[in-house]
Amino acid sequence: MKILMIALHYHGYTEAIAEELRLLGHEVRLHDLQPRDLVMRALRVTAPKLWQARLNKHHSTILKAERGWAADLVLFIQAHQMSHTNFERFRIAFPSARFALYNWDSLANHDYLDKAQYFDTIQTFDPDDAERHGFLYLPLFASRQFQDVPNRVKNRRSVYFVGNIVNPKRYTALDNFRRFCADHEISFRLYMACTPVVRRKLARQKISASGLAHGSIDVAEFRDMLETSHAVFDFANHAQSGYTMRIFENLCGGKKIITNNRRIERETFFSPDRILVLPNDGQYESVPDFLDIPIEHPQERFSHYTIQAFAVHLTDGTGHDNPSHGVER
């Protein structure tokens, strides 16, 4: 299959998906949905109209470069940034192709419903969005590098966190958990990436933040934290029901998971020996006992949630747990 893939760059995951599709035998041409240069990042904040104009031109450039290629599938990962005009141009340029959209963000964070008309198939990582709008539910995945992770855990009471501080609430939750761990002899390693915008929000709320980092974590450091920790701390965004990459990287890596996402209890992979759902944010009293309880089936690696399985569903246009769930448009 010939696949034209237009995707929002995110920590190398889009490139990993494209490579997985190639391993399946597909011919893939990958383009960034949004330019990553510093000028565009600045314009988005300081001059949004100019940013949108440049973004429209970027999409027109992609269309010009690929027009005439006989794509079988035009695959978007995220879509709310593209204008209606450019979507219409893409549909005209590729009249025989199936148009598919995958979203790894919720409608509450980025509303893309007005773009749904341009797609034959829509898949989302958010189960609530899938149920409400008849989309196909396809959760995120564990990349190959996070499958069959070596176990170098020496201390059961060891937890880690790697992620972005997207708002002051997440920082406060992590800081509270850090204090809890210190009081209960739990090792807690964390990497908190934080943008200047969120740093200013923290300062305005008079939150004296410590341990914040610039940019993404080094892969080797991430691997070390994963391999040597018994559990991961996952503080989910309450505006979404979808599960983060952290859930599946640790599920497939044989780790325990501490999360505030209560919906996870409804999933087939849930088991109380492997996943602890916090009763409320800030209530961590059950964590020590949870860490001490052995995982009942420690060798299980959940192959349904690997990037290999994800790539198949992505091209087939099917959902994860139930291929008949949702509708094709």
Image (cartoon, grey):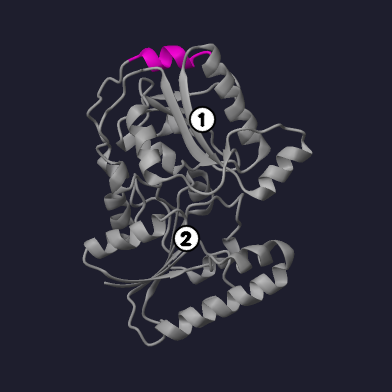
Q: Is residue 289 magenta?
A: yes
Is 64 rendered above or below residue 266?
Answer: below
Residue 262's disc is 1
* Percent coordinates x, y for residue 324 in the rendering: 35, 52
Q: In the displayed image of the protein, which residue is found farthest to the bottom? A: 68
Q: Is residue 182 left or right of residue 154?
A: right
Q: Which mark is residue 308?
A: none
Q: Residue 124: horizontal and vertical position, in percent?
A: 46, 53
- The kind of secondary structure element at disc 1 is helix
For marks 1 and 2 on the same chain, the one whose residue lies earlier in the sequence: 2
Report the magenta stretch's main SS: helix
Would residue 175 appear left or right of 92 to someone viewing this image?
A: right
Q: Which residues are magenta?
A: 284-293
Residue 266 left/right relative to 278: left
> SS class of the residue under badge 2?
loop
Quadrant of the rendering where the C terminus is positioned: bottom left
Residue nearest the viewer, comparing 174 with 213: 213
Q: Which residue is mark 2?
A: 9
| Residue type at tag 1 | Arg
Give the quarter of the image for residue 170.
top right
For marks 1 and 2, give the one nearer the viewer: 2
Task: Indicate whether residue 279 is drawn in magenta.
Answer: no
| Residue 274 at x, y percent in the picture | 36, 24
At 31% from the left and 16% from the top, the residue drawn is 294
Q: Is residue 268 visible?
A: no
Amino acid at the residue labelled 2:
His
Q: Residues within 10 Å of mark 2 (few under 14, many from 20)?
A: some
Residue 236 or 107: which is nearer the viewer? 236
Q: Residue at x 25, y 42 (%)?
A: 303
Along the line of sight, which residue is nearer the eye, 78 or 207?
207
